[in-house]
Image (cartoon, rainbow, N blue to C red):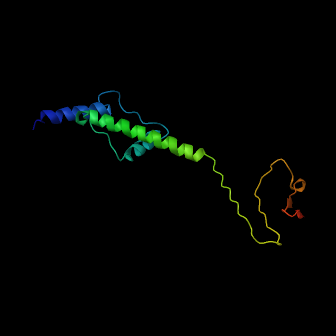
Amino acid sequence: QPASRPARKMDAARLRRRGAGSEPHRQDEGGIGEIVRKVKALDVYPKTLSEFNEKTETGGLISLLAIALIGLLLCTQLSAYCTVRTRDHLSVDVERERLIRINLNITFPAIPCAGIGLVTMDVAGGQQID
């Protein structure tokens, strides 16, 4: 039976897309062609024929808005990632006549530990040397 005109047109488009009629397919020596075919088989969004694509102004506007939103989110997240946040917390110990424990987490990469010391003094002038 003769194929209908639209069916012949689709078959011709498929042949053009596959490259039929041009030079024959060559098999790669190292099996790269097989790997490429397997990767292409993983495509969950296969391309439709160009005859079935319809580009509209609304689709273009949605695409532009999506690209702008992606760019905005990328910039804000990158900015938040690169921002250094320090958290300072200070509280007053109301108990008297007791030594206050002071914890510091400071890094001095170029000074040996033996060369670092801490001297604390309270309001009354009492000192504690560590």
The reply, left or right, for residue 63 in relation to residue 125 is left
Q: Residue at coordinates 63% horizontally, 47% vertically from top-left?
A: 84
The reply, left or right, for residue 86 in relation to residue 47 is right
Instruction: Identify whether 24 is placed above or below 94.
Output: above
Residue 111 at least partly seen: yes
Q: Nearer the viewer, residue 124 or 18?
A: 124
Return the x and y of residue 29 as percentages of the image width and height.
Answer: 48, 37
Q: Residue furthest top?
A: 22
Q: Quadrant of residue 96?
A: bottom right
Which quarter of the rendered picture does the N terminus lie within?
top left
Return the x and y of residue 111 as percentages of the image width and height.
Answer: 85, 49
The reply, left or right, for residue 47 in relation to residue 106 is left
Q: Quadrant of residue 99?
A: bottom right
The reply, left or right, for residue 10 in relation to residue 1 is right
Q: Residue furthest front?
A: 124
Return the x and y of residue 23 as percentages of the image width and height.
Answer: 35, 27
Q: Residue at coordinates 37% horizontally, 33% vertically from top-left?
A: 25
Q: Quadrant of residue 126?
A: bottom right
